[in-house]
Amino acid sequence: MKPRRFALTPGEPAGIGPDLCLLLAAQPQPHPLIAITSHALLTERAVQLGLAVNLISVSPEALPSTPAPAGSLYVWDTPLGAPVVAGHLNTANAGFVLETLTRAGNGCLNGLFAGMITAPVHKGVINDAGMAFSGHTEFLADLTATEQVVMMLATGDLRVALVTTHLPLREVADAITAERLERVTRILHADLVGKFGIARPRILVCGLNPHAGEGGHLGREELDIIEPTLQRLRLEGMDLQGPLPADTLFTPKYLAHCDAVLAMYHDQGLPVLKYKGFGAAVNVTLGLPIVRTSVDHGTALDLAGSGQVDTGSLQVALQTAYQMAETHS
């Protein structure tokens, strides 16, 4: 497999993202991996963790074509807004976080990188800084001028995609429209084929209401919106089962014979996936013209600089990005 460059963004500088990057440097990678972050931040955190990591400065005009040696990490230096204290948020660094994402995303668009892998950000501190930010997914959709993207998490043989993402629960039902469901289903199907190499994906679709509406007695979204939309798409050849009750869909009887589950909202599908594979799952943004994966956990401010960080999810995110880029090419 031909080596190709990937971007790594450490996310919130006061969180465990910098720790993850430094710990990752101990292991050789099959491709050049460029950490887009502050060189000074990594230097300080390495001292705090007692890690000897060789930080190799690179620039977009002269990016490496070979992987860094074990114990080394390529760094595209990005200036902080203020000094960082591990575990302590600072709104002055919100712009720094968004700049790292912008550099990585634009680098993917212009061919510098084959994909980007993101460590966790802290949405609250970015918004507290006066910058509207609802998450990586939405930010990258805007950056790449993508009208609709889909959040999917995966662990092992279970993939769960979402029709709605970061919405208050009382707004979810109104957001489940035929148009949105059709767009999301098309994106999920297309990327399972184009980025995961699954020739004919089989997708299980959750209902919105308990018992998938109980024939209309517990809500009519299944009858009026979900089932008619799925039937239209089935006529095009998509293999879609549902709407199925979410409380029975996530059982071996169904999951053994599917490639992905499409859940209607965030906390319908993701608790099951995280219970099965927390710390070994990956977050994938579907529908983008670029490859983007992320860890499945948060900033863990209490663990930053402690040396008690597990790189398992980041490793899965890296491997998934490598595989997707190979298929996507």
Image (cartoon, rainbow, N blue to C red):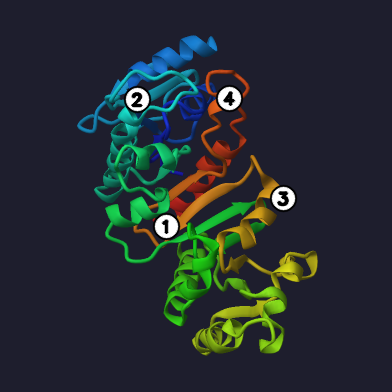
Q: Is residue 155 above or below residue 145?
A: above
Mark 1 residue crowding within 10 angstroms, few (<14) / some (14–19) / many (20+): some
**Helix, strand or loop for disc 3:** helix
Q: Which numbered disc covers residue 47?
A: none
Q: Residue at x 34, y 25 (%)?
A: 75
In whole angstroms, how far apart are the C-alphas of marks 2 and 1? 26 Å
234, 137: nearer the viewer: 137
**Helix, strand or loop for disc 1:** helix
Q: Which numbered disc covers residue 276?
A: 3
In whole angstroms, how far apart are the C-alphas of marks 4 and 2? 23 Å
Residue mark closest to the camera, 4 vs 1: 4
Q: Which numbered disc covers residue 328?
A: 1
Q: Quadrant of residue 81?
A: top left
Q: Which numbered disc covers residue 303?
A: 4
Q: Earlier in the sequence, mark 4 or mark 1?
A: 4
Residue mark closest to the camera, 4 vs 2: 4
Q: Earlier in the sequence, mark 3 or mark 2?
A: 2
